[in-house]
Image: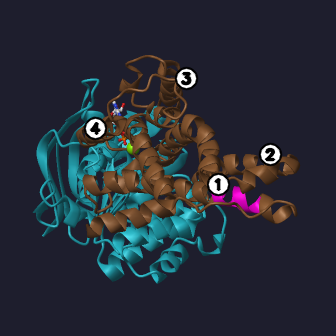
Chain colours: A cyan, B brown
């Protein structure tokens, strides 16, 4: 069952640049969906479309199984969001900002104190948002998105401006919300490493197209066949000869030699032969095709 | 209707600690305060004034002069710009548009807040006029209590007229304020229109400018300074207000990018 489905989204801004070119997106219920892409790829544009902040020019969006255009208000009752910079009122304090939303959503007053505690802003008292740091504003933005216990949370770069500690806190909060309350979370980021520990599903966007969509586990699977061994020695050219004598297909790369993956016993044997040939071995390791490079490959290939 | 009430409560909270309260206070009480000070300074000459039968209508007329020409139009311009600016300045339109509220509720609740501020302004001003009669009486021993009854009916009718007079200003300013991020646009256009209205007072078609009505309403007691048309300008004021509010709503709905 999908919490959010978008089909063939297409968007051009008034200056006629096509920014989104057929985006398909399916966010499973209860998932934490990481929406990845480099700067200017169209993440914010997509999320704005999903929330109705931009008029849908082509394609369709359904949330909670209902068409967005026709059921906008009912859907928005259960969606919390923060797009780009937080939208809090400068001249009010955190509690007053939340009180505005509390009136509109008609949720219990004690929710205000609850969400402030959740994002670590309980101690700001009567401080005006004008006097908040960037990270504090970001936290308030997240609190505003959480106030009415949404079923779907849409966050655009939520850890923007947070310190290392804050990032971990917010990540833990999101995982807890997903696990305990079953909230579906869609969050964007331009860094895979930042959300890798958090998400269950990923969608990768590059230049207005979805270049990958699936579970994080599937993405990891993809890297297995492309793994290789890397070897660094005092004399790579001699080592190459020794290796070809052993029947191992090696190639020279920028920082040493690349070998196909092999069992541990073979690696030890190979090492012994190199040493006997008078070659010093500095390092043997696996050339991890890590998620970052997979992601870079994908985004690059969309060009 | 219920969503309107929810939206309105939220909108009203946004005016807390903002300049709106100060604008209302200063704009409405400046003239009464000036009258009080002037009367205390010239307290020896107050006795005949307070004994006069038409004390209240006189005071009323004096107080409305600066109000009708100056404070009321400028207050309407500034307060409308201020309320619409709150969202632009805080990048908050995107927040407002993702609330479970219809566009109509958002539009009307904001306008409602502006109207309520205008009503507060009128109430405080009326109170101020009363105080400007009472305070000099309290503070100076020789002055008698004002003669003559307060003509409540006349005052109420005048209030209603001036209120209608400022509606077209609010409507035009609301349209501009919603449309333009930069607050200099609505404020600048507003000031220019106000100056234009002042300049156009003696012109026989001056009443076609939607910013002139409170001035014309006042100056009909003081002909010679303005060309007073024989037709009812309040109908024009209402017509303009309705037309511009509808135009503002159409433009508001048609926006492609919401925040
Ligand atoms: N209001 C606008 N008018 C015209 N073009 C725009 C507008 N907003 C964004 N764009 C363009 O759309 C493209 C995608 O922008 P978008 O903000 O969606 O990227 P993003 O993936 O969110 O990037 P980032 O990681 O920097 O936030 C960019 O090329 C940008 O220049
Ligand atoms: Mg963005």
x then y, percent, for residue B48 = 77, 50
Q: Is mark 4 within 8 Å of ligand 1?
A: no
Label 3 to label 2, Cα distance in Å?
25 Å
- Same subunit: marks 4 and 1: yes
Q: Earlier in the sequence, mark 3 or mark 1?
A: 1
Q: Which chain does tag 4 point to?
A: B
Please state which of the two labelled residues, at mark 4 or mark 2, is closer to the viewer. 2
Label 4 to label 1, Cα distance in Å?
38 Å
Please state which of the two labelled residues, at mark 4 or mark 1, is closer to the viewer. 1
Above or below residue B62? Residue A129 is below
Residue located at (27% from left, 27% from top): A14
Disc 3 target residue: B225
Q: Secondary structure at mark 3?
A: loop
Q: Earlier in the sequence, mark 2 or mark 1?
A: 2
Give residue B38's mark.
2
Q: Are marks 3 and 1 in contact (CB under 8 Å)?
A: no
Q: Secondary structure at mark 4?
A: helix
The answer to which of B10 and B116 lies nearer the viewer is B116
Label 4 to label 2, Cα distance in Å?
39 Å
- Same subunit: marks 4 and 3: yes
Above or below residue B108? Residue A239 is above
| Residue bounds of the magenta highlight | B128-135
Disc 1 target residue: B53
Label 4 to label 3, Cα distance in Å?
25 Å
Q: Quadrant of the C terminus of chain A?
A: top left
Q: Secondary structure at mark 2?
A: helix
Q: Is mark 3 within 8 Å of ligand 1?
A: no
Disc 4 target residue: B239
Q: Secondary structure at mark 1?
A: loop
Q: Which chain does tag 1 point to?
A: B
Label 2 to label 1, Cα distance in Å?
21 Å
Residue A78, by quadrant, is bottom left
């Amino acid at each position: 069952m999908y919490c959010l489905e978008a089909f063939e989204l297409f968007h051009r801004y008034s200056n006629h640049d096509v920014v989104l070119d057929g985006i398909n997106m399916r966010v499973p219920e209860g998932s934490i969906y990481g929406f990845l892409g480099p700067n200017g790829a169209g993440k914010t544009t997509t999320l704005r479309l999903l929330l109705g902040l931009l008029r849908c020019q082509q394609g369709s969006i359904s949330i909670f199984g209902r068409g967005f255009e026709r059921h906008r208000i009912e859907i928005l009752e259960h969606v919390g969001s923060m797009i780009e910079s937080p939208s809090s009122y400068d001249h009010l304090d955190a509690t007053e900002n939340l009180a505005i939303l509390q009136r509109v959503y008609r949720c219990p007053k004690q929710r205000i104190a609850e969400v402030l505690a959740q994002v670590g802003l309980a101690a700001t008292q009567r401080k005006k948002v004008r006097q908040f740091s960037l990270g504090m504003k970001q936290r308030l933005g997240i609190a505003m998105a959480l106030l009415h216990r949404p079923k779907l949370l849409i966050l655009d770069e939520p850890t923007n401006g947070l310190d290392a500690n804050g990032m971990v806190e917010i990540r833990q909060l999101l995982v807890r919300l997903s696990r305990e309350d079953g909230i579906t979370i869609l969050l964007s980021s331009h860094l895979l490493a930042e959300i890798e520990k958090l998400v269950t599903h990923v969608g990768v966007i590059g230049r207005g197209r979805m270049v990958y969509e699936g579970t994080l586990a599937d993405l990891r699977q993809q890297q297995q066949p492309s793994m290789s061994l890397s070897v660094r020695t005092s004399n790579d050219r001699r080592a190459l000869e020794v290796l070809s004598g052993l029947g191992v297909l090696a190639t020279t790369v920028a920082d040493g030699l690349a070998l196909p993956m092999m069992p541990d016993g073979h690696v030890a044997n190979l090492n012994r032969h190199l040493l006997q040939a008078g070659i010093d071995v500095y390092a043997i390791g696996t050339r991890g095709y890590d998620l970052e490079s997979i992601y870079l490959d994908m985004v690059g290939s969309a060009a | 209707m219920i969503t309107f009430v929810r939206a309105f409560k939220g909108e009203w909270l946004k005016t807390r600690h903002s300049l709106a309260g100060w604008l209302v206070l200063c704009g409405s009480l400046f003239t009464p305060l000036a009258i009080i000070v002037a009367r205390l300074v010239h307290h020896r000459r107050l006795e005949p004034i307070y004994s006069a039968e038409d004390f209240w209508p006189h005071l009323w007329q004096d107080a409305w002069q600066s109000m009708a020409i100056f404070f009321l139009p400028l207050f309407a311009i500034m307060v409308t710009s201020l309320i619409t600016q709150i969202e632009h300045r805080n990048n908050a339109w995107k927040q407002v548009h993702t609330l479970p509220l219809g566009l109509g509720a958002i539009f009307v609740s904001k306008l409602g807040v502006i109207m309520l501020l205008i009503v507060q302004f009128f109430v405080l001003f009326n109170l101020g006029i009363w105080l400007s009669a009472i305070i000099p009486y309290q503070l100076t021993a020789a002055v008698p209590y004002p003669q003559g009854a307060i003509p409540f009916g006349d005052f109420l009718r005048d209030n209603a007229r001036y209120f209608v007079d400022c509606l077209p200003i609010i409507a035009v300013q609301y349209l501009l304020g919603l449309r333009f991020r930069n607050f200099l646009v609505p404020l600048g256009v507003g000031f220019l229109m106000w100056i234009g209205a002042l300049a156009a007072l003696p012109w026989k078609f001056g009443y076609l400018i939607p910013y002139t009505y409170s001035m014309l309403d006042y100056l009909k007691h003081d002909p010679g300074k303005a060309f007073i048309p024989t037709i009812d300008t309040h109908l024009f004021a209402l017509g303009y207000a309705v037309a511009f509010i509808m135009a503002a709503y159409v433009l508001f709905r048609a926006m492609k990018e919401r925040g």
